[in-house]
Image (cartoon, helix red, strand yellow):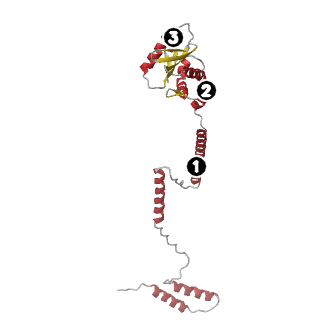
Amino acid sequence: VLLAAAVCTKAGKAIVSRQFVEMTRTRIEGLLAAFPKLMNTGKQHTFVETESVRYVYQPMEKLYMVLITTKNSNILEDLETLRLFSRVIPEYCRALEENEISEHCFDLIFAFDEIVALGYRENVNLAQIRTFTEMDSHEEKVFRAVRETQEREAKAEMRRKAKELQQARRDAERHGKKAPGFGGFGSSAVSGGVTAMITETIIETEKPKVAPAPARPTGPSKALKLGAKGKEVDNFVDKLKSEGENIMTSVGKRSAEAAKVLTSPINME
């Protein structure tokens, strides 16, 4: 069973460590700190054992790639797993240095999880690990494409509605009318529409104004006027005289007296 995988310095300082079974931080730090002391200088071995665990390691310039397993674990499988771990690190780090590995530590941890699950090796290769960590999904791409299309269509519809509203306002201002209210814009639009309806109702219910009486004509009146008859008789007599007729002057006197009688006021006492 694979207990943990770590990248550490030659002094035993852990840079990246991934535990595949439940283990405390103190224990993993103690195991990694004891690792440099167990290596025998001058001997080319890729593993070292203690009473409880086995260290399978591979040098990488100034660093070590270390796998901590149980003593009854298959050493051949552990060595093959160690080689896969060693090939994964250059895929995510441009240089095998402490700063570079620290910067891409989460990418390495995700890759380690694809190689080992619950302490046992997964049947994966380097290309599959790369694909799994990228989490490339065709369905996700289709979903994103559809969503982007919907967002573009919604933005285009909003621009079209805004242009229509501006055009309606310009037309209303040109004809001297109030701009029509549009629903869905909050309480201000509703209040504006209600105000317009109340104003129109008040205007319709107002009483029509009475037209002034037409002016009386200034022409001659056909009503009877007192004193006008005597003047007409005198004019008629003068006309006859001019035509050569002899008319008695008494007629004129009588007509004048009659006119005076007609024009004299009547005493009602």
Label 1 belongs to which residue?
161
Q: Which corner quadrant holds the C terminus?
A: bottom left
* Residue in the foreground of this view, choosing between 203 and 82: 82
Residue 126, numbered circle: 2
The answer to whether residue 223 is above or below residue 151 is below
Horizontal and vertical percent position of residue 136:
59, 34
x 45%, y 15%: residue: 51
Q: Is residue 237 left or right of residue 266?
A: right
- The residue most toward the right is 243
* Residue in the foreground of this view, choosing between 224 and 166: 166
Which amino acid type corresponds to the residue marked 1 in the rendered image? Answer: Lys
Badge 1 element: helix
The answer to whether residue 147 is above or below residue 136 is below
Q: In this rendering, which labeled residue sits more in front, label 3 or label 1? A: 3
Horizontal and vertical percent position of residue 112:
54, 25
- Give neighbour class at mark 2: few <14, some 14-19, many 20+ (Cα, 10 Å): some
Which amino acid type corresponds to the residue marked 2 in the rendered image? Answer: Leu
Q: In this rendering, which labeled residue sits more in front, label 2 or label 3? A: 3
Badge 2 element: helix
